[in-house]
Image (spheres, rainbow, N blue to C red):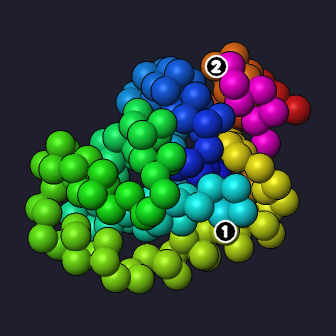
Amino acid sequence: MEFGDFQCPACQQFATFIKPQVDLNYVDSGVARFVFHDYPLTAGHPHAFFAARAARCAFDQGEEYFWPFHDQLFSHQATWAMSQTPPANAFESYADAIGLDRRPFTSCLESDRHADVVSANMRLGMELGVSGTPTIFVSKGGGMGVRVVRWSEFEGFKDVIDRLLAEDAGGGA
């Protein structure tokens, strides 16, 4: 469970270099599920809340569109994050690039749709003590779980996940 901010450079590094390894080793094989919770740090990232809503607008057309849109936001972060105005045009071009139906995406983007979901994710993060991004928890069976301290390296995930798997197999404390 990641609490992330699409305008956060550290989140971009995680999404680019570490998450693909987690996916390859655990998610793609069905051992784990990866859940993204919006946690836009609006004080320093003026477009982060808008980007979170845009990702939710992509999700409206199917979960299979969320992750490619997520990846577009992070791979083009250096471009849209520096915009002086909300980067709607950039987000619409990312939607086109992944094959979203432009009209409902744009309609969603122009509304306040999903502001409540993004705000709820932020409240959840605050309740769990999230103070920065990315903050990542690994759990078995739901709940907060174990906070991954070494999120900037795959071994940090491997250690936590393998320990939890060993506990399930009866080999851990």
Residue 67 visible to an observer of this rendering: no
Residue that sits furthest to the front in the current view: 84
Q: Residue at x 21, y 50 (%)?
A: 93
Question: Residue 70, how many percent across, how many down?
Answer: 40, 46
Q: Nearer the viewer, residue 73 or 117?
A: 73
Q: Which residue is mark 2?
A: 154
Q: Which residue is mark 1?
A: 122
- Examine the rendered structure and indicate whether residue 47 appears above or below residue 165: below
Disc 2, SS: helix
Q: Amino acid at mark 1?
A: Met
Q: Is residue 22 left or right of residue 57?
A: right
Q: Residue at x 52, y 81 (%)?
A: 116
Mark 2 closeness class: few <14, some 14–19, many ≥20 residues within 10 Å: some
Q: Amino acid at mark 2?
A: Phe
Q: Specify the quadrant of the image occupied by residue 104.
A: bottom left
- Considering only order in the chain, which callout, 1 or 2, is on the residue closer to the N terminus? 1
